[in-house]
């Protein structure tokens, strides 16, 4: 089932952090380099993540979290920001580590695309690391194409040379 979350108060923090558990662990060295206790460091990263969502992400108009849920478990998620009419920026696509390899991220992207088609013509832009073959394939399965050798982060207004720019385009018939 596809869930769209438009406000921080509607987030289930535990279920969301379960999706990002691996990334949060990996981010401890970057965000908490002096914390030797990994459990404490992960909690600090999670708190920082949730603070970002509450105070920055949802401070922007047109920001939403999209979640794929199965049997009450949040399996895959991503953030989407509406940049302008018909232009969206996707980020933070991730699947719970124990559900990876089953096509859930592609399914999530496909369901988002189908939902947005109801609004008319649109483009969804995303940046994906050039070495992240799994994510590149996931996007391609959902109809995204590489459109640039350098990604562009619409929220930070900066180029990302180590990433490809990907795009999904839908034109009304």
Image (tube, rainbow, N blue to C red):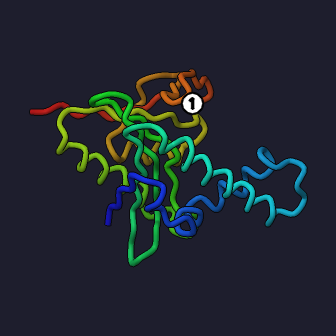
The answer to which of 73 and 65 lies nearer the viewer is: 65
Element on which disc 1 rests? strand
Q: Is residue 18 left or right of residue 125?
A: right
| Residue at 45 percent of width and 37 percent of height | 60
The answer to which of 153 and 95 lies nearer the viewer is: 153
| Residue at 33 percent of width and 27 percent of height | 84
The answer to which of 67 and 150 lies nearer the viewer is: 67
Q: Is residue 34 above or below residue 150?
A: below
Kindly give the residue lying farthest to the left in the view shown.
173
Q: Is residue 100 above or below residue 156?
A: below
The answer to which of 24 and 146 lies nearer the viewer is: 24
The image quarter in which residue 97 lies? bottom right
Q: Say which residue label 1 marks.
A: 163
Query: Residue 153: x and y, percent?
Result: 52, 28
Query: Residue 98: x and y, percent?
Result: 56, 70
| Residue at 9 percent of width and 33 percent of height | 173
Query: Residue 3: x and y, percent?
Result: 35, 61
Q: Residues within 10 Å of mark 1 (few under 14, many from 20)?
A: many
Query: Residue 91: x and y, percent?
Result: 49, 42
The image quarter in which residue 88 lies? top left
Q: Please count the marks in the image.
A: 1
Q: Is residue 19 left or right of residue 7?
A: right
Q: Is residue 87 left or right of residue 26?
A: left
């Amino acid at each position: 089932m596809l869930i769209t979350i438009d406000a921080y108060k509607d987030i289930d923090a535990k279920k969301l952090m379960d999706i990002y558990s691996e990334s949060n662990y990996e981010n401890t060295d970057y965000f908490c380099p002096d914390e030797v206790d990994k459990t404490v460091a992960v909690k600090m990263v999670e708190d920082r993540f949730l603070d970002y969502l509450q105070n920055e992400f949802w401070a922007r108009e047109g920001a939403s979290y999209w979640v794929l849920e199965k049997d009450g478990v949040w399996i895959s998620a991503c953030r989407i920001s509406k940049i302008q009419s018909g232009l969206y920026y996707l980020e933070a696509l991730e699947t719970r580590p124990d559900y990876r390899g089953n096509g859930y991220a592609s399914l999530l992207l496909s369901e988002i695309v189908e939902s947005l088609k109801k609004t008319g013509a649109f483009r969804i832009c995303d940046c994906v690391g050039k070495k992240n073959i799994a994510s590149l394939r996931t996007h391609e399965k959902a109809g995204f194409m590489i459109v640039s050798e350098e990604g562009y982060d619409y929220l930070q207004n900066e180029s990302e040379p180590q990433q490809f720019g990907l795009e999904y385009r839908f034109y009304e018939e």
